[in-house]
Image (cartoon, coloured by chain):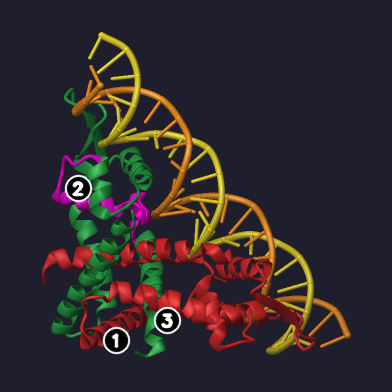
Chain colours: A green, B red, C orange, D yellow
Amino acid sequence: MDNTKQHSVGRWISLLHRYGNVYMNEQLKAYNLGAGQYQFLAVLYDNEGLSQDELAHTLKMDKGTAARAIAKLEKEGYVERKTFSVDKRIKKLYLTDKAHAFKSTLTSILSGWSSITTKNLSEDEHVFAMKLLNKMSLNAETYLDEMK
Amino acid sequence: MDNTKQHSVGRWISLLHRYGNVYMNEQLKAYNLGAGQYQFLAVLYDNEGLSQDELAHTLKMDKGTAARAIAKLEKEGYVERKTFSVDKRIKKLYLTDKAHAFKSTLTSILSGWSSITTKNLSEDEHVFAMKLLNKMSLNAETYLDEMK
DNA sequence: TATTATTAGTTGCTTACGCAACTAAGTGTA
DNA sequence: TACACTTAGTTGCGTAAGCAACTAATAATA
């Protein structure tokens, strides 16, 4: 196996992540959001009513990170936290009208980045790339989850 | 194009980046290094004598980030900064004996992560994945560089 | 040659994130 | 029922990173 490749995977992932954040920050600035919040919002669009913990777990993020991201989303009026009497620890998350109105904007921002990064990939390559990235991230998850 | 995919690319990249950092931090702790330094060291192994600016440029990182990463590497005894009389602004970076001794360790840590993430990929898939990631990061670079 | 522009590096500020310690609420068991 | 365990969420702390303002050195130009 070519060493260059092994050295480079991390570099490419890192670059894609950092540049992706720069792009997202730029695009989201007008909506008072940053790269640290949109993933949570994206999950909520498909799963309204999740708790913070479920959300953190879905994204494989630290619950502290989730707490702060959601606090920001709440502060900016995108989500509401509701406690029900069943279990007072749990705060279920609901989208506001503002969030619903923002959904298509977020979608197009996300497809924007997707188009940029996959510009010169064929449809087949694109599909294959997604499949491989999915596999790789599942591998990463499995490995680190087994560590604990 | 399936929306799930477009939503997910960012999520996978983010996950691979975050989990990769957790892995690297864990592996590098014993050497008093963190995820924020190893990329700089890796580039220097192949290009001793680069300046900070060249290094930052190679990795597409902010020069402030580079300054701090290299300060850490210097503090821990992995690199030395040398100023030559030709241009006193430039500090060329050289590896210490400690860094040279560490090279193979870093290589195997990096291949470790590479093997973990590509565990169930065939050799062909692996090669193809690298090619696609390379393309995607080049696209990201091109896009953001053209913004300025 | 004097002044202006560019360049390399540093530093303050902000955001994103993981980890760990903590609180409060809920569950289980002796 | 009392005490231990678990769970959801919060918060302090440290690291990684980008941006912007700054300094000092060099290059360019009037």
- Element at badge 3? helix
* Chain name for mark 3: A
Residue that numbered label 3 is attached to = A7
Residue at the (57%, 88%) spot, across then down: B47
Q: Give the alpha-carbon distance from disc 3 to disc 2, as whole Å.
A: 36 Å
The magenta-colored residue range is A27-51
Quadrant into which the N terminus of chain A falls = bottom left
**Can you tell which quarter of the image residue B69 is in?**
bottom right
Relative placement, left or right, of A131 versus A9 is left
| First-in-chain label (3 vs 2) | 3
Q: Give the alpha-carbon distance from disc 1 to disc 2, as whole Å.
A: 33 Å
The answer to whether the residues at label 1 and label 2 have Cβ atoms under 8 Å apart is: no
List x then y, in percent, for residue B146. Answer: 41, 79
Asked whether residue B96 appears in the rendered view, the answer is no
List x then y, in percent, for residue A77. Answer: 29, 39
The numbered disc on residue B67 is none
Residue at the (25%, 64%) spot, across then down: A110
Residue that numbered label 1 is attached to = B131
Say which amino acid is labelled 3: His
List x then y, in percent, for residue B74. Answer: 67, 71
Asked if residue A50 is among those painted magenta in the image, a careful observer would answer yes
Residue that numbered label 2 is attached to = A44
As rendered, which of B45 and A125 lies closer to the eye? Answer: B45
Asked if residue A83 is among those painted magenta in the image, a careful observer would answer no
Q: Nearer the viewer, mark 1 or mark 2?
A: 1
Say which amino acid is labelled 2: Leu
As rendered, which of B63 and A29 lies closer to the eye? Answer: B63
Residue at the (26%, 54%) spot, across then down: A59
Crowding around mark 1 (Cα neighbors within 10 Å: few <14, some 14 to 19, many 20+) is some
